[in-house]
Image (tube, rainbow, N blue to C red):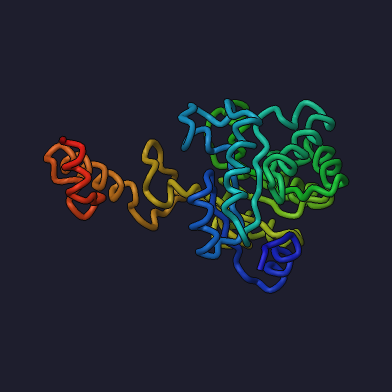
Amino acid sequence: MKTTVATLKKMKENHEKITMLTCYDYTTAKLMDAAGIEILLVGDSLGNTVLGYEDTLSVTMDDMIHHTAAVARGVKNALVIGDMPFMSYQTSIYDALVNAGRFMKEGRANMVKLEGGARVCEQIEAIVKADIPVCAHLGLTPQSVNAFGGFKVQGKSAEAARELLDDAKRVEEAGASLVVLEGIPAKLATIITEEVSIPTIGIGAGAGCDGQVLVYQDMLGMFSDYVPKFVKQFANVGEVMSTAFKNYMREVKEGTFPAQEHTYKIEDEVIEALEK
């Protein structure tokens, strides 16, 4: 069954946890979709994990469209979210609408995500009025890393916690169907989850959220440049891949690969005819 906005709302009402993972390519999308993951987020984190940028700020709309379309082609049931990159929606409501539309038309996304609370509510409202579902993103929002002075936990003071709770209510009122809560204290995330009717997806926000999301390279042990505290490695795929690469290189250099079973046969008389 295709996951939709209605599906996610019903899951929250039934207290059924929602699973989300980042995804950036067709092959991985097929594997995640077959496993039953409800939401695939084509995050601007691809700047770090796929494209080798120093941050997410360098990611362009063309980068995002390219990868979102690849993921969408690999999905049958999961809901695909396209992450609106830095300066694709902050500049104006018009730009936000145009770029959200590109995600739907060119990227074949089912929803778009944008960072910020009250300051982007006009963009959220306009996008939703264009019949494009929106996922909001509050707390530690990577596109605001320079304003935050680094990757720091948000909402630790009474004032900051109140602002996050207010922002969650504001984005819901603006029409957001989902909200990601990143890098905030678990107790605060639980309160926000109880105070809003839309599902909350946590990343470094504790188990009280309606669902969870991780960067898939982090949870598979493939990306070791920096491992946040909230990441659990469910497998060490990076080590398996490294071992396989080394074994391939060794066998090629030794001449043991390809072996007989990896080659195609030809009749001896054909070879003999060539030698005449």
Q: Identify the residue at image location x=55%, y=51%.
A: 203
Left or right: 251 in relation to 102: left
Q: Identify the residue at image location x=75%, y=39%.
A: 100
Query: The C terminus is located in which quarter?
Result: top left
Relative image position of residue 109 (x, y in whole percent) = 69, 47
Q: Identify the residue at image location x=51%, y=58%.
A: 32
Q: Is residue 154 visible?
A: no
Query: The N terminus is located in which quarter?
Result: bottom right
Relative image position of residue 9 (x, y in whole percent) = 73, 64
Q: Identify the residue at image location x=26%, y=50%.
A: 264
Judge whether 12 appears above or below 157 on screen.
below
Residue, far bottom: 14
- Out of 123 and 187, give the one closest to the viewer: 123
Left or right: 153 in relation to 224: right
- Out of 249 and 37, give the one closest to the viewer: 249
- Out of 253 and 89, give the one closest to the viewer: 253
Relative image position of residue 49 (x, y in whole percent) = 46, 37
Relative image position of residue 255 (x, y in whole percent) = 13, 41
- Out of 218 and 24, give the one closest to the viewer: 24
Q: Is residue 39 visible?
A: yes
Left or right: 101 in relation to 179: right
